[in-house]
């Protein structure tokens, strides 16, 4: 069985898993863990979108 | 404010350094490496352990399903060696995948390289998880 995700889906899944682990391991209280996990997720996905638009403009 | 949190952190580090090595501080990282998240589970951090386990195992399984490459022990190219170091962090998952000869086929599609990265990052995340389990075991983290 072979799974062929789109680039964006792969990047979002990557962001979900990495943000979860970063949130749990890099902060102490539950509140801080959730906040840091969400921050990492937004940064990952935001970076992907930003890089995508940059490449779109460079291509034009 | 910043000074007080810094001194609290230093006090926790000094306290952790003064404590002798306990059994749990050796067992938790070892079990956590072999089974991702288990280092937290044996210390009764149920939710954290389950979330870590789900994240790392799912990432590794998705990497295999995406036809990612699993690096074998090697002494060749530096990137291959680093790939092996990343993969081996997944512990039991890596051992099972080697035993079943997974991740050795030819790359059939463009996004298979993401699979390789998923596998390496799953291993690296497990290293972080193991370090966290150790910090909980020695009392440096609650």
Image (cartoon, rainbow, N blue to C red):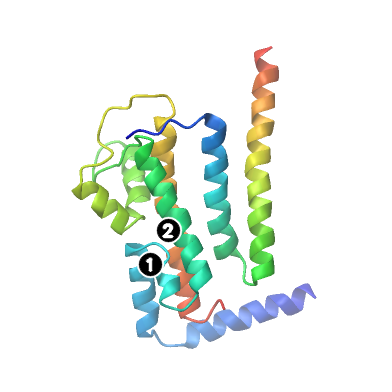
Residue B52: horizontal and vertical position, in percent?
48, 61
Which residue shows up at 52% across the image and 68% down it?
Answer: B48
Look at 32% across and 37% down and name the residue there.
B69
Numbered circles on residues, count: 2
- The residue lying at 63 percent from left, 48 percent from top is A41
The residue most toward the right is B1
- Label 2 SS: helix
Q: Mark 2 or 1 closer to N-term? A: 1
Residue B95: quadrant of the picture: bottom left
Q: Is residue B34 above or below residue B125?
A: below
As rendered, which of B88 and B8 lies closer to the eye?
B88
Q: Are marks 2 and 1 on the same chain?
A: yes
Whether label 2 touches label 1, CB < 8 Å: yes
Residue A42 screen position, x and y as percent: 68, 46
- The picture places residue A39, in percent across and down from the top left corner, at 68, 53
Quadrant of the rendering where the N terminus of chain B is positioned:
bottom right
Q: Where residue B132 appears, x then y in whole percent? A: 49, 68
Task: Using the image, tell me which numbered label, if any, was put on residue B126.
Answer: 2
Label number found at residue B32: 1
- Looking at the figure, which quarter contains the C terminus of chain B? bottom right
Q: Residue at x 67, y 45 (%)?
A: A43
Identify the residue at the far top of this view: A60
Q: Chain of mark 2?
A: B
Residue B130 shown left or right of residue B98 in the figure: right
Residue neighbourhood size for the residue with mark 1, other residues' Cα within 10 Å, grouped as few (<14), some (14–19), many (≥20): many
Along the viewing direction, whichever of A12 and B95 lies nearer the viewer: A12
Q: Residues within 10 Å of mark 2 (few under 14, many from 20)?
A: many
Q: Secondary structure at mark 1?
A: helix
With A41 as the anchor, is B36 left or right in this view?
left
Q: CA distance from mark 2 to mark 1?
A: 8 Å
């Amino acid at each position: 069985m072979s799974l062929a995700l789109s680039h964006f889906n792969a990047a979002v899944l990557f962001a979900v898993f990495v943000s979860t682990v970063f949130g749990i391991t890099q902060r102490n209280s539950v509140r801080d863990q959730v906040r840091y996990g969400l921050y990492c997720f937004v940064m990952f996905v935001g970076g992907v979108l930003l890089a995508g638009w940059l490449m779109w403009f460079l291509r034009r | 404010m910043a000074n007080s949190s810094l001194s609290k952190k230093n006090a926790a580090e000094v306290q952790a350094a003064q404590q002798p090595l306990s059994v749990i501080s050796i067992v938790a990282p070892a079990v956590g490496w072999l089974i991702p998240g288990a280092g937290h589970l044996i210390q009764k951090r149920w939710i954290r352990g389950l979330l870590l386990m789900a994240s790392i195992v799912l990432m590794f399984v998705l990497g295999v399903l995406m036809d990612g490459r699993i690096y074998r022990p090697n002494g060749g190219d530096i990137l291959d060696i680093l790939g092996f170091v990343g993969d081996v962090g997944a512990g039991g998952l890596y051992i099972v995948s080697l035993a079943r000869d997974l991740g050795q086929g030819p790359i059939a599609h463009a996004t298979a390289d993401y699979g390789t990265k998923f596998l390496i990052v799953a291993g690296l995340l497990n290293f972080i998880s193991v370090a966290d389990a150790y910090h909980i075991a020695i009392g440096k983290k609650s």
